[in-house]
Image (tube, rainbow, N blue to C red):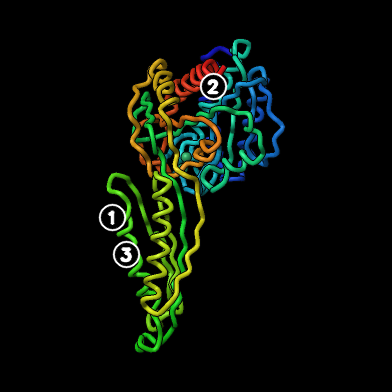
Amino acid sequence: MTEQEIMDYARAEFEWLHAHPELAYEEFETTARLRAAFGHADIRILDVPLQTGLVAAIGTGAKPIVALRTDIDALPVHEETRLPYASQYDGKMHACGHDFHMASVLAAALLLKEREANLIGTVYIVCQPAEEAPGGARTVLDTGVLAEVTAIFGIHARPIYSVGTFGVCTGGMMASVDKFEIIFHGTGTHAAQPDRGCDPIVMAAQFVTAAQSIVARNVSPLRPGVVSVTHINAGTTWNVLPERAWMEGTIRLFDADDRTLVKGRVEALAKGIAAGFGGRAEVSWTAGPPAVVNTERWNALARDAAAQEGFAVVDAVPWMAGEDFAYYQESMESCFAFIGTGLAPENHHPKFMVDPAAIPQTARYLVRMAEEVLKRLK
Ligand SMILES: [Zn+2]
Ligand SMILES: [Zn+2]
């Protein structure tokens, strides 16, 4: 295939993928489509026990091995873009640009396949399920397929930049994610006789206010952080004080020590407030990925590769959202980059959209990056 044919094909695949979004761990059609695309191009698909997603390989099979990663899942969002290739599935949408990641990585794989004879070492193409649900990257890592990979490279569509813009930053680029759930236990009573019970709603209300002091008064003002209570449920009617109040929320930070500190403060405040009011708090946690952190070693190369492909290179504005790409960073070298996909509402918005004009340049960046890194690792 000529480069133009590859880009036209990737563009058509982008539209198909956008029209057929599937949620985390349900990406069966998506996986079949990718499998067929790699199969037609004679790209070897590795035998990996994944229900959805796949890992393909281009090159000699020998080390060094670098990986290009795309996520493949969509979100439970009802699309409102009115694009001609809008989602055909009610309540499901590629609202985070993972369709764009797939099309770009697919085009990169096809370009690399054309140049396979000149490739030093091996490039793995990692099509990862379930980025939006906790665990997709972990699911791939747990198969052991990436054990020999030295470095992995990923991208994310960002609608805050126009097409042709490329951004990385050194240090925290995307935040760690923790979810907390708190139950305040009190004693139910008649609303007219609060003295006969112990009101968990007052405890919950005090906690919501007090929790805002954690970032303001415990985390260094030089480091950003978020503590958000997002969902509260207590009581059943107007004249009864309930037994308990339930809430959940999330913490977003860039620094691992801050993560420990803030979790400790949430627990201490919840339990201390509850005890002070004569009740009790139960706090439980669901840990998401750590922060995505880039190092200057590969950033410098990434900026250079992007500039050579004609991108305007900027210092990326860190994004407080989470990305399970961070799990790969725990065991291999890496660089994660933001790609401008045209100004649009934020990722996860029902009107989020990607300008597919960004695909060819992104694919060429990924190819250059893979080839340059392999040269350096040899
Ligand atoms: Zn997302
Ligand atoms: Zn995403």
Query: Secondary structure beneath disc 3?
Result: helix
Q: Nearer the viewer, mark 3 or mark 2?
A: 3
- Which residue is identified by label 1? 216
Task: Give the residue at x 68% y 24%.
Answer: 44
The x and y percentages for residue 361 are 44, 20
The residue indicated by pointer 3 is 210
**Residue located at (63% from left, 21% from top):** 63
| Residue 361 appears left or right of 161 | right
Which amino acid type is marked by label 1?
A: Ala
Q: Are marks 3 and 1 in contact (CB under 8 Å)?
A: no
Q: Is residue 83 above or below residue 225?
A: above
Label 2 secondary element: helix
Upstream in the sequence, badge 3 or badge 2? Answer: 2
Amino acid type at circle 2 is Ala
Q: Nearer the viewer, residue 168 or 50?
A: 168
At label 3, which amino acid type do we have?
Ala
Q: Nearer the viewer, residue 338 or 195?
A: 195
For label 2, count other residues whose C-alpha is less than 10 Å away and answer few (under 14), some (14-19) or many (20+).
Answer: many
Mark 3, ligand 1, within 8 Å: the answer is no
Q: Check mark 1 vs ligand 1: CB closer than 8 Å? yes or no.
A: no
Give the label on residue 108, or none.
Answer: 2
What is the CA distance from the residue labelled 1 to the residue labelled 2? 44 Å
- What is the crowding at mark 3: few (fewer than 14 residues within 10 Å), some, or many (at least 20)? some
Q: Give the spatial CA distance, label 3 vs label 1.
A: 10 Å
Percent x, y of residue 211: 34, 61
Graded by Cα atoms within 10 Å as few (under 14), some (14 to 19) or many (20 or more), the crowding at tag 1 reads few
User: Do the residues bearing badges 1 and 2 touch, measured as CB atoms within 8 Å?
Assistant: no
